[in-house]
Image (cartoon, rainbow, N blue to C red):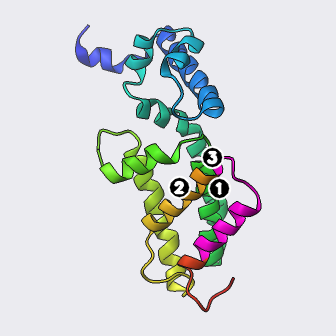
Amino acid sequence: MNAREQQGRKPRADVQRNRAALLEAAQRHFLRDGVGTSLEAVAKEAGVGPGTLYRHFPTREALLSAVLQSRTEELVTRRADIAGIDDAGTALTQWLRAMEDYLSAYSGLPEPLMAATRAQDPDNPLTVPCDELIATTDEYVRAAQRTGYVRPSVTGYDLFLAACSLAWIKGTGTTGESVDRLRALVAHGYREPDDRT
């Protein structure tokens, strides 16, 4: 069998099973222990050796990117709901909240995502999803700027970093009124001074 025929073949059933088991185990570990969890423990829970894990996911970022796919689908659904909002300021606020929820899915998640945006490494599997989040945020920012809701100097990247910061704070166990007050401080920073509160 030549290389072209091999590329067109579906993965073997055991390969698909191993990948699914690794993703399920990683999801559980990320939820329980955060993104810095032991990859060897993930492999052990999935019933495979570390070598199998690294064949499927050569880096922690590759595994994290694959696990985040299910969370990304939820974010896409929320974005579709937000698209029906006529008020640009409200749409931006709703998007920032959706992104904050996405970024706080696992303890420690903001760090590798912010690192991916700083490095702009095309080989890092987290770079493209981060670029997409920033581009989407920028669309909401520009729409809100056209209505005078957001200061002209604010960028989508600024608010991506703000959402990462809030998600990181939530990951420390800070909740409730403190997070609400911080969210309000961020909002007052990006809004034009004379607009809605």
The location of residue 87, given as percent across then percent down, is: 65, 78
Toward the viewer: 164 or 129? 164
Q: Is residue 159 above or below residue 10?
A: below
The location of residue 142, given as percent across then percent down, is: 47, 76
Residue extent of the magenta highlight: 170-187
Disc 3 from disc 1: Cα separation: 21 Å
Magenta segment: does it hold 180? yes
The location of residue 105, given as percent across then percent down, is: 62, 43
Q: How many other residues sit within 10 Å of disc 3, few (<14), some (14-19) or many (≥20)?
A: some
Disc 2 from disc 3: Cα separation: 10 Å
Marks 3/1 in contact by CB < 8 Å: the verdict is no
Find residue 171 and name its label.
Answer: 3
Residue 6 in view here:
yes
Decide if residue 182 is on the left or right side of residue 154: right
> Which residue lies under the disc numbered 2?
164
Decide if residue 145 is on the left or right side of residue 101: left
Q: Amino acid at mark 1?
A: Arg
Residue that extends furthest to the right in the rendered view of this protein: 176
Q: Quick one: quadrant of the C terminus? A: bottom right
- Residue visible at 66% across and 72% down? 184
Q: How many other residues sit within 10 Å of disc 2, few (<14), some (14-19) or many (≥20)?
A: many
